[in-house]
Image (cartoon, rainbow, N blue to C red):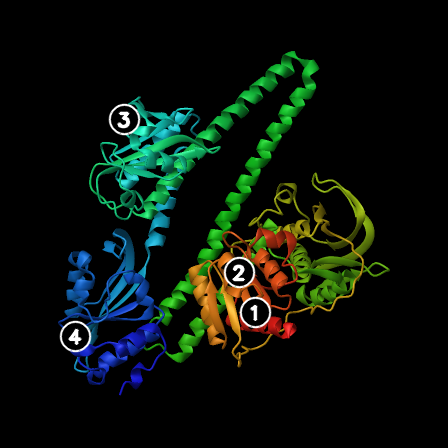
Amino acid sequence: MTDWLQRDGDMAGRIRRHDWNGTSLGPLEQWPDVLKTTVALSLASHFPQAIVWGPELVTLYNDAFVPILGSKPEALGRRFDEVWQEVWSEIGPIVRGAFDGRATYIENFPLVIERGGGPEPAYFTFCFSPIRDQFGNVVGMLDTVTETTSTVFMTQRLAVLDAIGNAVANASDSQTIMATTTQILAARLNLSNCAYADMDEDEDGFTIRGDWAREGSPHIVGHYRLADFGQLAVANLRAGKPLVVNDNLKELAPEEAATFQAIGIAATICVPLIKGGRLTALMAIHDSAPRVWSSNDLALLMEVTQRSWAHIERARADAAVREGLAALAELNATLEERVEERTTRLKQTEAALRQSQKLEAIGQLTGGVAHDFNNLLTIIRSSVDFLCMPNLSEERRQRYMTAVSETVERAAKLTSQLLAFARRQPLKPKVIDVGKQVRGLGDMLQTVTGARIQVVVELCDRPCHIRADLSQFETAVINMALNARDAMNGQGTLWLRLSCGNGMPPIRGHAAAAQPFAAVTLADTGSGIVPEVLEHIFEPFFTTKEVGKGTGLGLSQVFGFAKQSGGNVDVSTVVGEGTVFTLYLPEVEHEASHELDREETSHLVLEKGKRRVLVVEDNLEVGRFANQILQDLGYETDWATNAEEALEMVGADAMAFDAVFSDVVMPGISGIALAKELRQRRKDLPVVLTSGYSQELALTGHEGFEFLSKPYSADQVSRVLSRAILRAE
């Protein structure tokens, strides 16, 4: 009997069908209980796991382990040392240690493996654990592994780029920048030579400007014709593709030049720079010893090349600004009649200063995001580590699952606040009675602010309507109110006023507007804001509160929401007397609306029919996840990785599917353009759009289609898709 193996999944089926009589394991029904239990647990795990059994090292593995193998020959039932023969000298001793009873955990272990496309560098975090029978004897090994190649490369990439950025931050000439860049690159990647080559204007030749990584550089090595590389090489370089050549500049065969993963030879890599559609320069990296280059190495070389020239251009721009300032001083001293030209130059300098301030704000933003998200990821990672522990009680498992779920919600909220500041979140604007909302918020704020703060609500004498995202509007008012509460130290008066029909005054250099605006004002009797703080209050992550008491995103969210909704936010303050914030939003005509004020909540709705849903998602991990959710909900699914493929699959009349669940941001045709085309083919086809961020969504909305923000949960997918299908019926 094989009841223990009655599971869904590709590997469960393959294990059932495999002929085990030719191995030391024998028929499935004769397998020892400890092996059956281990296989069943492994197949149920979402972590990549392989089981190595007995002295013959027979290999079994679960579905999640399949990507680790890549295009290797069939591994099921084979010896583990044969499957991984190219790296057995490195992992063999660890496997033998497991069979000797020693568990081993290693992070980011480097290996050069074969997965069907030639040798490729890869990194893995794994745990080799002995499997014991009922008598305590080691009978096998459990290999739990996660590939960390992309994470390791990203860390290396950021380290190199940060080192280069810090080293050339104050450099003022191109020679210093190129020398520093190539020296750091050569040291970090253990290269024997890095050189920079200027291209001729006609792109027919180039001059190598020395071995920049060597002391005393640069010097002119020589001039070479581009044609010496061969026609294929010239075409690739002019198209912006890197080229690998041997020491004789001989053109490599197409199959060699097409992949870096197969290159384990001493070679020179020429990384081209394209500017204005023209081949401008080359970075030449030479490796004198055989080495396997990966696509990650190539990506780093490409980015370093582009960043180097960006630093050079910045240095040239800085030099131009200094020259401009000197020229202005000379004009001011000697040519009073050229005041107009001088004023123009000054405006240019002021624009450069504003750009510098924007860059400083971006630096604050990225630092704050990294800090907050690292805190959230710490909770998630720790919870997942505990969830992986064997013999975990159900109470603790539920506790860690709840921690992960709640932390994801906090991360989603942080993302929403960031997008509001950047004016990039997909809003859901509708016409709302702002007086009604202000009255309701006043009642709620009386509870939130505490008994010692009196909330006074003053409304205009007529109905007033705005078009805005209701949730973001309420969040903006609450953020301003909470700042007022803190400024009053829990005691005082908070006025919440609404006035309508007046224009918007000039605010912080922005022009006034004569059209009618709704003005929501919050005035407090607090301590006021000192001038040195006032100029920073709308910056992201700026806060005067102690650590742990605020994120510094509240007022930046108010500012972002106001600007994205066509308005602005003003502030006036008197130190020691109080502060007044005024949120201006364009007034609109009233229109009937049948939309729900709040999205309903429900439990998972399982599809009982045989409806077919097409998933359109270019990200493989997200697509696989969405596909699984819909199948678990009872739908039959197909998956397209881009809009072009989706249009072919739905057919000319779009009758092949009952609904479409599509991402917005994809290469080629966007999700919104896809939805519009589907509407042309079949007006009643339910389409649900999903995105975490989209410039198109931020500007135009979701065009009347159902929309689900990322990150989403299974019950959200169930609710939104069911609603879309019901509306179409």
Residue under label 4, please give it.
138
Residue at (20%, 39%) from the top-left corner? Answer: 289
The answer for how far apart the CA atoms under marks 3 and 1 are is 69 Å
| 4 and 2 marks in contact (CB < 8 Å) | no
Front of the two marks 3 and 1: 1
Residue under label 3, please give it.
215
| 3 and 4 marks in contact (CB < 8 Å) | no
Q: Residues within 10 Å of mark 1 (few under 14, many from 20)?
A: few
Quadrant of image for the C terminus: bottom right
| 2 and 3 marks in contact (CB < 8 Å) | no
- Judge from the rendering whether residue 131 lies leftward or rightward of residue 702; answer left or right: left
- The mark that comes first in sequence, 4 or 2, is 4
Image mark for residue 535: none
- The mark that comes first in sequence, 3 or 4, is 4
The answer for how far apart the CA atoms under marks 4 and 2 are is 55 Å
- The mark that comes first in sequence, 2 or 3, is 3
Amino acid type for the residue under numbered disc 1 = Met
Residue under label 2, please give it.
647
The answer for how far apart the CA atoms under marks 3 and 4 are is 58 Å
The answer for how far apart the CA atoms under marks 2 and 1 are is 11 Å
- Judge from the rendering whether residue 49 lies leftward or rightward of residue 371; answer left or right: left
- The mark that comes first in sequence, 2 or 1, is 2
Residue at (39%, 65%) from the top-left corner? Answer: 382
Residue under label 1, please give it.
655
Amino acid type for the residue under numbered disc 3 = Glu
The image shows residue 263, relative to residue 227, as above or below, that is below
In the image, residue 544 lies at what x, y percent? 58, 50
- The mark that comes first in sequence, 1 or 4, is 4
Residue at (75%, 55%) from the top-left corner? Answer: 520
